[in-house]
Structure formats: structure tokens, C-alpha cells
Amino acid sequence: MQCLISSPSHLVTMALLVPHQARLALVAAESELKVPFADELPARQEQLAALQNTEEFDVLVVGGGATGVGCALDAVTRNLKTALVERSDFSSGTSSRSTKLIHGGVRYLQKAIMQLDYEQYKMVKEALLERANLLEIAPHLSAPLPIMLPVYKWWQLPYYWAGIKMYDVVAGIYCLKSSYVLSKSKALELFPMLKKDKLVGAIVYYDGQHNDARMNLAIGLTAARYGAAVANYTEVVHLLKSTDPQTGKQKVCGAHCRDVITGKEFDVKAKCVINATGPFTDSLRKMDNQESQNICQPSAGVHIVIPGYYSPDNMGLLDPATSDGRVIFFLPWENMTIAGTTDTPTSVTAHPIPGEDDINFILREVRNYLSADVEVRRGDVLAAWSGIRPLVTDPNSKDTQSICRNHVVSISDSGLVTIAGGKWTTYRSMAEETLDAAVERLALSAGPCKTVGLMLDGAKGWTPTFYIRLVQDYGLEKEVAQHLASTYGAKAYDVAKIAQVTGQRWPIVGKRLVSEFPYIEAEVLYAIKEYACTAIDIIARRTRLGFLNVQAADEALPRIVEIMGKELDWSQEKRTAELDAARKFLYHEMGYRSRSEQLTKTSEINLDYQEVVRYKKRFHKFDKERKGFITTVDVQQVLENINVHIDENSLHEILNEVDLNKNGQVEIDEFLQLMSAVKKGQVSDSRLAILMKTVEESLDKRGPVTVDRSGGGV
């Protein structure tokens, strides 16, 4: 029989804590804790050496997502000798593909009240307590966010108001800010993109928002600073077992691991092995016991990113009842807008792909809530991703088909500890519960949990005005300084110190990877110190460029690979392979394929006669010889006439986006397909379409030189 650990025992304790007591708990905890790597993190090679050379760890955590790194931090701060291995990168799975909210779950509370479900209520209560803690321990990576719930029927106003107020009441002293009701005019003032028709008013409530991948990394780096041996790209090949001399039973005593990068294999011995592998929970459970029943029921959640002008800078939107009953969030994030999520059953995969049906479903729901003045275009989807939510069934439940609403901690007969399910917000309490169970069942010598109020990497010394010092001390652009401060906290100084001088009057240091985003080249070098091993690690998790704009990420990749290649001494073959792998990642997992397929050789040209005439006239301003196609040379000649210069490489990239048969030229039918796709909203921000329109307008404005202006022929 497996041992199931029931509801969290720390709820009562945490409920009694008020904010200043949480800080006192922090002082008490930190006075007992040593931070052996406060100044500099050990390199990945040193971490691998520690894994191989340590005779026995107290705890080995498998999985580098939010729950896994949470368990590692909890264990190491209890003075347990701790190790963590992750077969890919930290936060490479679900933990980097969330809705970016730190929340209790308004919809769960609604179910708790409507169904008189105490378990749902406890889950919301726990999440709200953890929300408050997370906002306190990582203020640079998280902040409160107001979310608007628009109301279109009068009877819904008191109904929703009561539910949202209950959310505040349950949060109690941890309520971020009190919710409030808005009139129709005030709602439109704060969210001008909102659909006006039949709008009655709105309710605004507060939840937290964070940079999920960076938060995950901050927890992992904090564990490393406290002495945990953590290594990404280190997979478990099989579990190690030994025979218990007292009972004669087989006990898990570690794992046989493989360094994915070098292929080297080695054993990591541990008194306790914790399975925190998210959607891959069952794979490790079956390594322990082939007869184990599957407990993970994965669900896919797709999100899309659209330009920031779709939402106000500091106001989110909640659609509580979409056309098929799912909840959609519409949130500002990193100067963009995130919309999602879907919730559909899926199979477990390390490389989930966002489907076109899900993308279009989200766009349809967004259109329902935005004003008709705002044209929601398919071409405005800058990135899209799918995350696998690891819903679980209770392995000890008689009804094994019922999905557990929260999480389960189970310990197998051989001692494998599994933590499965749950949500991002409650990672810390899940880790505490897991370690409490492991300490008790496996008789580990450890003190109580110390992670309540324990500041994460970069949090100490950070203030909301910290970025000003970066501008003043290093000559960084304001936008870049704000980005560095909100990403690295007080550690932003370490990034600024290695930033190269630009040679310009301003900014003095900090060369951007791409012009429209505040990511700088120095971050690539710093990311290697943060255990980044691949170009994908940089664009997806150390920076968030791949999640924000796939085209911009694609443009930044050659320089990223060049910097990493030089620092890590990559061969030319390795550099080419890294570039190809990163582009494949963008194409499949970040929605580049869906974006690029909006314009294909078989796309239907949907233009009326007048539009065809107008666009052919525009095309022939470049194709003066009526060849039926244009090349970079044709475009360059026209640009010279209006004193505009674009280098040949950039021009080639601009034309290549439209050159469907990749023959180095854009035929007139390819141009008409482009303009048709722009008209239908399937393609937006086409550089060639905008360039040709701008040039045409400039040439028409000039017009032919009149006789009197030329001197009358004299």
C-alpha cells in the first residue's frame, strides 16, 4: 500500500501569520542559515562534480520545474544535503508556459460556494496565502495586477460582486487591494478597447502576476546559493535500489543519471528521492514499479501573445464564461498582451505544439469582448505556446477516475516520494508538505520548514526605484535598466558590469539584441552563469523573447549563438546545430509555423478588381521593366530615388518573408497573395507591404517636376 499524505498541516500556522510576523520568521530563519555561494554561483561543471563525488545526499529531487526547485530550496534550508537533476532546462516545461498569474482562483471559489465544497475552499485559501508570500519574497519578479470583469446584464452585477467580495474576504489580511465596482463610463475610461454595446459596468479585483520562468529560475538559484547541487540537462536513466536489511524489501536509494550534453553517466546516492516531474510523473513512478497505475491526466493550455495596444498597460480582463464554458484571461505582460488559456485533454510530450484551432478559438473570444473599432487580426499573433497541466488522480482513491482538484503527495512501498498536480502559486506549500512527509516517513534528520518569507535570488536590496541607479551608474537606457531591475533584481548590477560600451553618446553601455526589446547582449553571458546551455535557454527562459515575438527571437538568434559559441568554445558544427534547434523550437513550439502558414503558395487571393489594379500599380513602381517580379536590386534602385538606404542583407530578409517559392524574387502573384492576407488580417506587420506602401506614397507626393519649377526649359 502507498501512504497518502492528506491536507496541508501548515494552513493553520500560516493563517495566523500577519505580514510583519512573516518578516520576523525570515529574520529567524536567516540567522540560522549559511549561504555558501552568496557572491558567486558554482559553475555547472562544479555542480556535476558535487553530484558525482558526494557519497550520499539526504534528498535527491528529480524535476526542475516550480515544484522541484521548491522542494530543493525547502530541503537545503532544513540543512538537508540536497541534490536536484532536470533532464532539460529549469522551467523548460509547464512552469514557463503558464498564464503568468499568481492567484487563488476566482473560479475555484465560485465552485466551492455553489457546490458547498470545502476542499475547493481550502485550496483557494491556501493559494491566497501563498500569493501573498510569493509577492513578498520576489518583489522584482512579481506585482499585483488589477483584473476587470465586464458585466453585460444587470442581474449579473450583484452576483459577480458577491463572488469577488468573497474572494477578498477569504484572502483576509492577505487581500492585495479591495475589489470595486465601476460604472460603464469609468470601465471604458480604464479599458477603452472594451465592447460598449450592452455594457452595464464592471468589477475590478486584484491578483498577482509574475515572470514565471524567471521566478522558477530564481527559486532554483536560491537553492544553489544555499548549497544544493543542482544540474540541468541531467536525466535519470533508472532508479537505484538497495535491500533493507531489517525488512528485506527493496528501497529506492538514488538514481543513475546521464549528463545530456556530454553523455557521461554516473550514480547519485540519496536517502530520499522526490519525484517532481510534473506531466512526466508516471514515467518515474513506473521506473520504481512497472505495475504503478497512471495518475496523471494531462490537459493542454494554449496561450497567444498579441501586441500591447490590445490592452491597457496595467489592467487585465477576465471572460468568466466563454462560448464553451471555459475561462479566458486577457492580460498585459512584458509590454505585450497575453490571451488564454484553453483546456483540452492531451498526451504527454516534452514538446507541446499550439494548434491553429486553439489559437482561433482564443481570437474569437477576444473579439467578443473588444470594441468593433479594434480589428482582432490573426496576423497580430506574435507568438503562441502550449503548456501541459498535470492534473492528477489520487492513487489511493477508490474512484481512480476522479481528478484531484489540488495535489497529492504519495510515498511508494520502496520509498519513492511523489508530489503531483497542484498549481504554480502553491509550489512552496506543496514543497513543504512533501518534505514534511519525507522527513517523517524516511526518518530524515531535519528541522521545520524555513521558506515562509525567505527572499529569493535578487530580491534583497531591490526597490521600485533601483533601475535609476543603473541608469546613473552605468549609462543604460531607462527601458533597459527597468528590464534588468525587474528581471534580476539587485543582481542586475552583475549584468550591467559585463555590458559592453556602445561607443555612442547614449546609451553608454548595453547593446540590444533586437531594437524593439530591452534585452542586451550582456544577458547572454550572464545567462551562462545561470546555467544556460543552449540558445533555446536564452530566448525562452533567461530572456522571454521567444514567448513575446517569434520573429524578433529568430532575428536575435545568430548573435546569441555567436556570443555563446565564443564563450563556450563551440565548433562551427555545434553553432549550426544550436541555430537549427532554436529555429525548430520557435517554428513548432512558439507558434512560428502557425504564423508563417498564414501566407502560402496556395493562399487564395481575395481582392476585388479595384484593389488588384491598385496593388499592381504599386508593384510596377518597383518592377519598371514589367518583368513580373522584383528583386533586392529593384527595391534598392527605387529607394535611392527617395534618398533612403537599407542594407542588402536587410532587404533580402524583407523579400524572403514573401518569397514563397524561395527563388530570390517576389512575383506579382506572391505580392497579391500578401496583400490579400493583409486585408483578411492573416498577416500583419509585413515589412515589404509597409515599405512598398510608404515608398509609393512618397513618390506620389513628389509627382513629376513641373515646367515652371524646372526653369521653363531655359
Image (cartoon, helix red, strand yellow):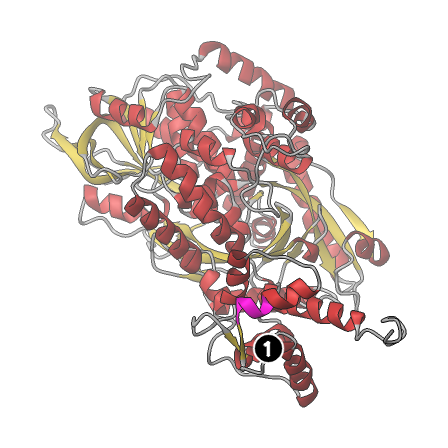
Q: Is residue 140 visible?
A: no
- Which residue is the extreme one toward the front? 714
* Span of residues in magenta: 631-635
Q: Residue furthest top?
A: 31
Query: Looking at the picture, which amino acid does disc 1 mark?
Result: Asp
Residue 296 rendering spot, x and y as whole percentages: 34, 51
- Report if residue 520 lies within the magenta region: no
Give the answer, above or below, for where 531 lies relative to 578: above
Rendered-image quadrant of the N terminus? top left
Q: In the picture shown, does residue 434 fall above or below 396? A: above
**Residue 692 pos. (x, y %):** 65, 69
On screen, 565 above or below 370?
above
Task: Write down the residue under mark 1.
Answer: 623
Query: Would you place residue 417 above or below residue 399 in this image?
Result: above
Q: Position of residue 49 (x, y in %)?
A: 25, 24
Q: Quadrant of residue 197?
A: bottom right
In this rendering, position of residue 414 left or right of residue 296:
left
